Image (cartoon, helix red, strand yellow):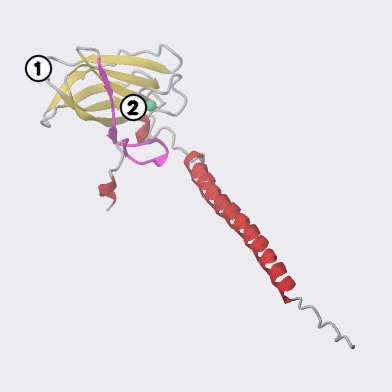
Amino acid sequence: MSTAPNPPRPRSWLRLQFSLGTIFWLMLVVGIIMAWWKDRTSLDERLKKLEQMYAPTQQTLWGAADILGAPDDPTGGAGKSWCPAGTSGPDWVEVGFDGAVPATKIDLYETYLVGCVTEVIVIDGNGDETSIWKGADPTTATVARTGLFAVPVPASVKSVQRVKIHVDSTNRGSWPCIDAVGLTTAAGKTAWGTSSNSSSVYAGGSLSATSKKATWHGLW
Ligand SMILES: [Ca+2]
């Protein structure tokens, strides 16, 4: 009896099993790489955004924006005050507020060359102007190069929307700067400037500034 030779055992199922296993592992590895890459890309994007948020940008010193907000120039030499361009002559700066404030006192935080204010004019909620003080500025430097000039608002002025301050450094040879302007009510509440406009600015900066944020619809 002759025995037929065993037919060669088909190995295709082995190859299939191997291929399926390989594909499974490949897919798993590719999936892990894709998930890692996606995570990495989104992390990169978030890091870039963070960098942009906190990147140190060059800030203008002694500019129109430096008179806005609460005082932040405690020595008078940090550049956080509005400064006119010249050191000998008249100049003015006008500071606006978010709303018309029933102020009873205006605080002028003078810096650098203190004692140069010549006139203070207030503009009320209706746009009417009143000169509330004019003369020789009695302010002297109390701390470093800073001095506070508190100007009372007469009772006839019911609200203050803007304050225009005239300064004069003629023959003084330095810069009459202002750190901040505050409006204080009888109840003791103080509002700080949110916009400014001026006759000149140190180092050729912008003559005006605002701290109000643009609304989204203002961008279209
Ligand atoms: Ca300031």
Q: Which quadrant, please, contains the N terminus?
A: bottom right
Q: Is residue 209 magenta?
A: yes
Report the side of 49 relative to 179 (left or right): right
How far apart are labels 1 and 2 at the CA level? 26 Å
The image quadrant of residue 94 is top left
Residue range (magenta): 189-211
Q: Residue at x 62, y 62 (%)?
A: 27
Tell me the amino acid under the disc marked 2: Gly
Assess whether mark 2 and mark 1 are in contact (beta carbons under 8 angstroms). Answer: no
Residue 80 in view of the camera:
yes
Mark toward the viewer: 1 or 2: 2
Say if disc 2 is inside 8 Å of ligand 1. Answer: yes
SS for dot 1: loop
Image x and y of residue 90, in percent: 29, 30
Report the side of 143 relative to 44 (left or right): left
Q: Which mark is residue 69?
A: 2
The single residue placed furthest to the bottom in the displayed view is: 2
Residue 113 in view of the camera:
no
Q: Which mark is residue 76?
A: none
Image x and y of residue 130, in percent: 14, 24
Q: Residue at x 81, y 83 (%)?
A: 7
Could you classify mark 2 by the number of other residues whose Cα lies within 10 Å: few (under 14), some (14-19), or many (20 or more)?
Answer: some
Q: Which residue is mark 1?
A: 156
SS for dot 2: loop
Tell me the amino acid under the disc marked 1: Ser
Image x and y of residue 76, in percent: 43, 22
